[in-house]
Image: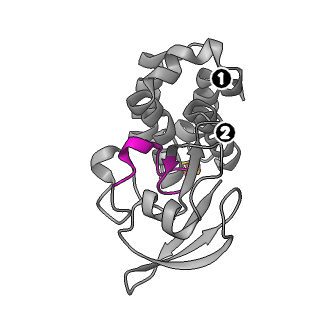
Amino acid sequence: MVCVAGPAWPQGAALVLGVGPCAPAGVHLAPAGITVRELIDEYCGGMLDGHTFYAYLPGGASGGILPASMGNIPLDFDTLQPHGCFIGSAAVVVLSDHDSAVAAARNLMHFFRHESCGQCTPCRVGTAKALDLIRRPQWDLPALEDLSAVMRDASICGLGQAAPNPIDCVIRYFPHELQAVPNRPEAQA
Ligand code: SF4
C-alpha cells in the first residue's frame, strides 16, 4: 500500500496519509477531486525506485480496481460510478508493477468472506463461492458474472452488494492477467 486518503471533509478536502513504500510518510491535506496520479506525485513522494504505477483501488476494499491508465479521474463522489467503482471510504490503495490485480482481488474476497456476517445467503455463500472460483488458475467468467449479479441484487447490505466489485474490475480492466494467470505465480496468492 502506498497511500491512503481519509474520508472527504465537508469543506471539500481530504486527509491523506502516506504510508508504506512512499516518501515522505506523514499526513497531508488534499483537495477533494484530486487524482491518484497527483496523490502519488505531489503528496506521497512518487513511486519507489524500481516500481511503476500499475493500478489503484479508489475507494477501499469494495470500491473496485482501476488501471494506471485511468489514473486521471478526479477522486470524488459521482466521478467513479461510470467506471464501475466508487470513492467509498476514500482509502486509496496503489499497486505497482510488482503486484497484480488478480492477487488483489483474491486478497479482497478473502477479506469479504471473513467479514460477511452470514445473515443472508447471497453474501454468505457468494463470497465463499467467489473466492473458490477466483483461486482457480482459470476463471470461469460466466459463473463469476452470474454470481456477481446475484450478490449485487440479493444481498441485504452494502458489503455483499459491493463485494464483487474487485472481480468485476479484473474482468473488465485486466483481462491480460486472466490470460496469464497460469504463468504468474505471484497471482496465486
Ligand atoms: S450482505 Fe450484509 S447482511 Fe448479508 S451476509 Fe453480507 S454482511 Fe451480512
Q: Position of residue 4 (x, y in %)?
A: 59, 64
Q: Residue at x 58, y 30 (%)?
A: 102
Residue 46 percent location from the top left of the image: 56, 58
Residue 156 on the magenta span:
no
Q: Is residue 44 left or right of residue 41?
A: right
Percent across and percent down for residue 15 are: 53, 77
77 and 16: which one is in front?
16
Q: Residues within 10 Å of mark 1 (few under 14, many from 20)?
A: some
Q: Is residue 30 above or below residue 156?
A: below
Which residue is labeled 2 in the image?
Answer: 107
First reached walking from the N terminus: tag 2 or tag 1? 2
Give the SS element for disc 2.
helix
Residue depicted at x 35% and y 54% = 72
Q: Secondary structure at mark 1?
A: loop
Q: Is residue 138 above or below residue 157?
A: above
Q: Give whichever of 177, 151 is nearer the camera.
A: 177
> Does the magenta-highlighted stretch encompass residue 65?
yes
In what quadrant of the picture does the C terminus appear?
A: top right
Amino acid at dot 1: Arg
Q: Residues within 10 Å of mark 2 (few under 14, many from 20)?
A: some
Q: Is 50 situated left or right of 81 in this image? A: right
**In this view of the protein, can residue 157 be seen by the observer?**
no
C-alpha gap between disc 2 and disc 1: 10 Å
Three-letter amino acid code of the residue under disc 2: Asn
Q: Residue at x 47, y 32 (%)?
A: 170
Number of numbered tags placed on the structure image: 2
- In the image, the segment drawn in magenta is 56-72
Question: Would you place residue 19 above or below residue 174 in this image?
Answer: below
Q: Which mark is residue 135?
A: 1
